[in-house]
Image: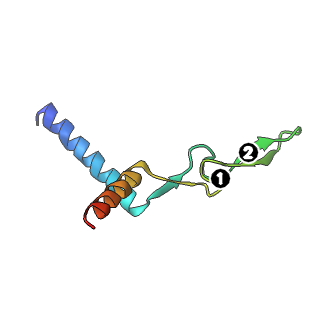
């Protein structure tokens, strides 16, 4: 197998895997709050304490994946164009 063919097959496998992940689970954990929905702080004794609500995910702890967002944009564009 040539290196170019192997690289293209690997790229195709990664792309199909990510599109399958976006179809099965369109939402992932928020990168800022790591899925908690709020920031964690420590008090003076060093114990963990709830901080402010996350503004990026609006306290849900979830975000839409990039691939699913691109699919939604393409579907909306197609739907608006064929009306």
Q: Are marks 1 and 2 in contact (CB under 8 Å)?
A: yes
Image coordinates of residue 76 in percent, x first then y, are 35, 60
Q: Residue 39, relative to residue 7: is it above or below? A: below
Q: Residue 72, relative to residue 42: is it above or below? A: below
Whether residue 20 is visible, yes or no, is no
- Which residue is rendered at x = 88% and y = 38% of the image? 44
Distance (Cα) linking label 1 and label 2? 9 Å
Image coordinates of residue 58 in percent, x first then y, are 63, 54
Q: Nearer the viewer, residue 40 or 1?
A: 40
Whether residue 67 is visible, yes or no, is yes
Local packing at callout 1 (Cα closer than 10 Å; few below 14, some 14-19, many 20+) is some
32 left or right of 71 in image: right
Under circle 2, the secondary element is strand
- In the rendered image, which residue does mark 1 sit on? 36
Q: Residue 29, relative to residue 81: is it above or below? A: above
- Which residue is rendered at x = 32% and y = 52% of the image? 17
Image quadrant holding the N terminus, namely top left
Q: Nearer the viewer, residue 32 or 71?
A: 71
Which residue of the protein is positioned furthest toward the right in this rendering? 44
50 left or right of 36 in image: right
- Which residue is rendered at x = 37% and y = 61% of the image? 23
Image coordinates of residue 71 in percent, x first then y, are 34, 55
Which residue of the protein is positioned furthest toward the left in this rendering? 1
- In the rendered image, which residue does mark 2 sit on? 40
């Amino acid at each position: 197998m040539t290196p170019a063919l192997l690289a293209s097959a690997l790229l195709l496998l990664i792309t199909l895997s990510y599109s399958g992940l976006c179809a099965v689970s369109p939402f992932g954990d928020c990168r800022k709050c790591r899925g908690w929905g709020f920031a964690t702080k420590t008090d003076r004794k060093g114990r963990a304490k709830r901080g402010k609500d996350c503004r990026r995910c609006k306290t849900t702890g979830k975000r839409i994946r990039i691939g699913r967002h691109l699919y939604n944009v393409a579907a909306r564009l197609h739907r608006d164009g064929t009306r």
